[in-house]
Amino acid sequence: MKANATKAIVVGGLLGGAGDLLFAIAWAGINGMAPQKLLQVIASGWFGQAAFEGGWNTAAIGFASHFGIALVVAALFSALVTRVPGLLERPLVAGMALGVATFLVMRLVVLPLSAFPFPVKMFTLGAALDLLSHLFLFGTPIAFARRYFGTRSA
C-alpha cells in the first residue's frame, strides 16, 4: 500500500471516528447518559449486558472498537477508490454515500449479529441524527482525507 493511501486511511479513520463519537457523546449527554456508559454501549456489541459491569475497562474496549471500525471502513473505502475511477471527483457525495452505507451495515448487519443487548431501531429521532452524523461527521471526512492524500506524493 502506498504511503499516501495509508495516511488517508489513518487520518480519515481518526477524523471520522472522532466526529461520530463526539456527536454520540453529545447526544448521549443530552439524554442523561455519561460518556463512560456510551462507550460501554459500544463494547456491549462484544460483551452484551456484561459490558456495563466492566467500568472503564469495557469503556476503553468500546472506544478502541469504535476507532477500529472507523479505520476498517476508511481502508475499505480507500480500496474501493482504487477500483472505481472518478469516485472522488465529488468527495462530499462519496462521503455521504459512505456514511449511508456504514449506517445501514451497522444497524442491519453488525448490531443484530453481535451481542448488542438492545433492540436496533431505525425510525427514531436518535437514529435520524445518527444517520446525519454518519453522513457528515463520519463518511465525509474519510472521503475528503482520501482525496487530499490521494493527490499528494508520499
Image (spheres, rainbow, N blue to C red):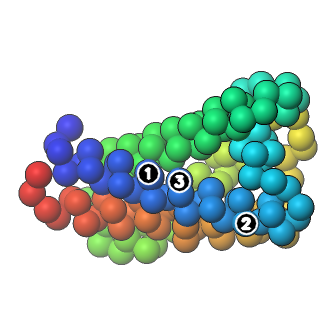
Q: Residue furthest left?
A: 153
Towards the viewer: 62 or 56: 56
Rendering coords of residue 70 (x, y %): 51, 47
Looking at the picture, which amino acid does disc 2 mark? Ala
Left or right of 66, for residue 32: right
**What residue lies at 62% left-to-right and 56% top-to-bottom?**
21
Do the residues under discs 3 and 1 have CB atoms within 8 angstroms?
Answer: yes
- Relative vertical location of residue 126 with respect to residue 8 in this rendering, above or below: below
Q: Residue at x 56, y 37 (%)?
A: 64
Q: Which mark's residue is nearer the viewer, 2 or 3?
A: 2
Identify the element where label 3 is drawn: helix
- Towards the viewer: 115 or 54: 54
Q: Which amino acid type corresponds to the residue marked 1 in the rendered image?
A: Gly
Query: Is any atom of residue 111 visible in this view?
Result: no
Question: Which image quarter: residue 65?
Answer: top right
Residue 119 coordinates in the image, percent (x, y)? 90, 43
Distance from Cα at disc 2 to Cα at disc 3: 14 Å
Query: Which corner quadrant of the image does residue 55 belong to?
Result: top right
Q: Which residue carries the number 2 mark?
A: 26
Give the vertical position of 141 relative to 109 (above or below): below
- Residue 63 image point, x, y percent: 61, 42
Q: Quadrant of residue 25?
A: bottom right
Residue ID for mark 3: 17
Left or right of residue 59, residue 88 in this image: left
Report the residue marked by disc 1.
13
Distance from label 3 to label 1 (Cα)?
A: 6 Å
> Which residue is painted at 53% across and 44% down in the image?
67
The answer to whether one can see residue 53 in this image is yes
Q: Which badge, 1 or 2, comes first in the chain's sequence?
A: 1
